[in-house]
Image (cartoon, coloured by chain):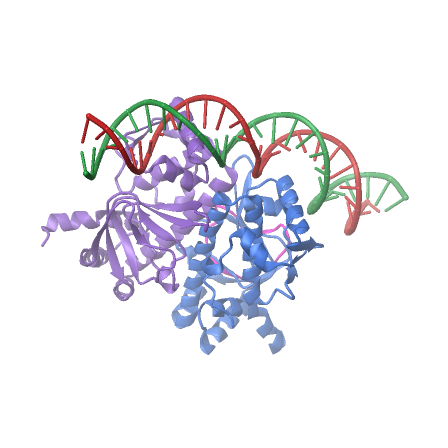
Chain colours: A blue, B purple, C red, D green
Amino acid sequence: MHPPMLEGTLAQPVIRRLNALRQLSERGIALLQQAILEGLQRARPGEDLVSEGDPIDSVRMILSGWLCRYKTLEDGRRQIVNFVLPGDCCDACVYLLTAMDHSIGALTPVTYAAIKRSAFEQLLASDRSVAEAMWCETMVNSAIQREWTVNIGRRVALERIAHLLCELHERLLPVDMIEDGSCLFPITQMDLADATGLSVVHVNRTLQELRSSGLIVLRDRTLTITDLKVLKDTALFSADYLHTKRRG
Amino acid sequence: MHPPMLEGTLAQPVIRRLNALRQLSERGIALLQQAILEGLQRARPGEDLVSEGDPIDSVRMILSGWLCRYKTLEDGRRQIVNFVLPGDCCDACVYLLTAMDHSIGALTPVTYAAIKRSAFEQLLASDRSVAEAMWCETMVNSAIQREWTVNIGRRVALERIAHLLCELHERLLPVDMIEDGSCLFPITQMDLADATGLSVVHVNRTLQELRSSGLIVLRDRTLTITDLKVLKDTALFSADYLHTKRRG
DNA sequence: GCACTGTCTTAACATACTTAAAGTCGCGTC
DNA sequence: GACGCGACTTTAAGTATGTTAAGACAGTGC
């Protein structure tokens, strides 16, 4: 089917991501790759991979594309509670619960692997390093969620958006999606608003401010962080909560 | 040391809490009780059980008292990211990470059990029902954290505080800490402010509003929810995210 | 008995952010 | 080529919430 090179490339983000949390064994990597190839799927922008209330039957690993987890209130207000990036896993372990309490929607075209609960349990059981990396990933997601609470609860708009940009930057690094401080940035201002608990109008204003301060360039779905240090300072950003191994 | 009756009572909240998530086996309960009795500890109000940056070496199970998880920004702003109630476990699995990314502080006198990492792993390994209940608890904590993000990001002050009260009510039920709709409520208005991302003054204003609407009575550290239905409605509260088994 | 401290309360004022509305630009469709 | 649509932008007006300040009250220590 696929030439071997390509197969390797496909699973790369997941392997890199997990490896950044916990050294994976050779055997674990092989098993992981196999499981991923067996469950390949695609989704289109705007499509929901899972919706609030759905039964939880499988784990998903993102190979390419951006997604978001979100919840909606009865009256339509929406809050994005996290972004899901290539290499991330959705709901490892969540299968212990019965129904999804939030939705996961694709922001761009997405390729991912869906691994059935039983196959996933088998995978975890057969290699300890993979299992631990997965648990780690889950724990880091919790940590990110806590930081989002802080971000929305205690930072003002400018800091808040700066912080989000710093986080995304930091998370894109280990999966090699930053080139010269630039990355694809498919998030609309409306998404940004729903993620930060602000209104679109104010997000727009705030982005202008970040631009005119010379901290970022954001144009044509491309984000360039021109002064990372100052951006981090204005965001009161510390990467500790991401728990990623320091890279030389 | 302890009379048997008392020993049983001590571990009750933890057992009830876990049982509400996953049916525990007899054997599991016994092991759990034993582990808890071996690690008994106390903390005084204001004391931190763990602080941001601390190495993670043990799991803690709360037997009595209220605590909060919180993070502080460099300039002193504080955000409480969750309350920890009797029966809750702190950081099951977090031991996979190396350092705490937040602090846990006691709001009242607290009794808890600290279980060393190795003993905890042994406990999980020796009874599957306990292990699964623990993972469940961790997943539910994530779900709560997501809902907090929604709460702070998209609900206005009145809804926000109402929602928090509903959540606490719902979480206190399975550990039997609600009597006739009333419970001990040791949270100061400042804590409430730090938990909801509001200012103390506005929390005060908002509480007055809830009081004068006849939804709650809050006096002398005691909270009575006088109209739970309406309180839930004004909070846009749905308990689904708590993933607790329905109780007849 | 008095000072001290923490919690709650109220007031007056300031402002960060929201809402509403309308206009621009680029892009795909018919 | 006109139209519709989504994303972005800008303006103006409104408001929810923050800030500052000061007082009441209870509990605690001396």
Is residue A56 on the magenta stretch?
yes
Above/below status of B151 relative to C10:
below
Picture quarter with the N terminus of chain A = bottom right
- Residue B4 image offset from top left, x and y in percent: 11, 51
In the visual, does B41 lie left or right of B76? Answer: left
Above/below status of B221 relative to B103:
above
- Residue A5 image offset from top left, x and y in percent: 61, 77
Residue at the image point whose x is 43% and y is 45% from the top: B79
Residue at the image point whose x is 35% and y is 60% from the top: B54
Q: Is residue A38 visible?
A: no
Residue at the image point whose x is 30% and y is 40% from the top: B172
**Location of residue A225 by image quarter:** bottom right
- What segment is highlighted magenta in the picture? A43-62
Above/below status of A210 relative to B227:
below
**Location of residue A123 by image quarter:** bottom left
Q: Nearer the viewer, residue A6 or B167?
A: B167
Above/below status of A243 relative to B241:
below
In the visual, does B152 lie left or right of A192? Answer: left
- Residue B158 image offset from top left, x and y in percent: 46, 31
Is residue B248 on the magenta stretch?
no
Number of numbered discs overlaid on the protein picture: 0
Q: Is residue A133 visible?
A: yes
- Residue A22 image offset from top left, x and y in percent: 44, 69
Q: Nearer the viewer, residue A173 or B19?
A: A173
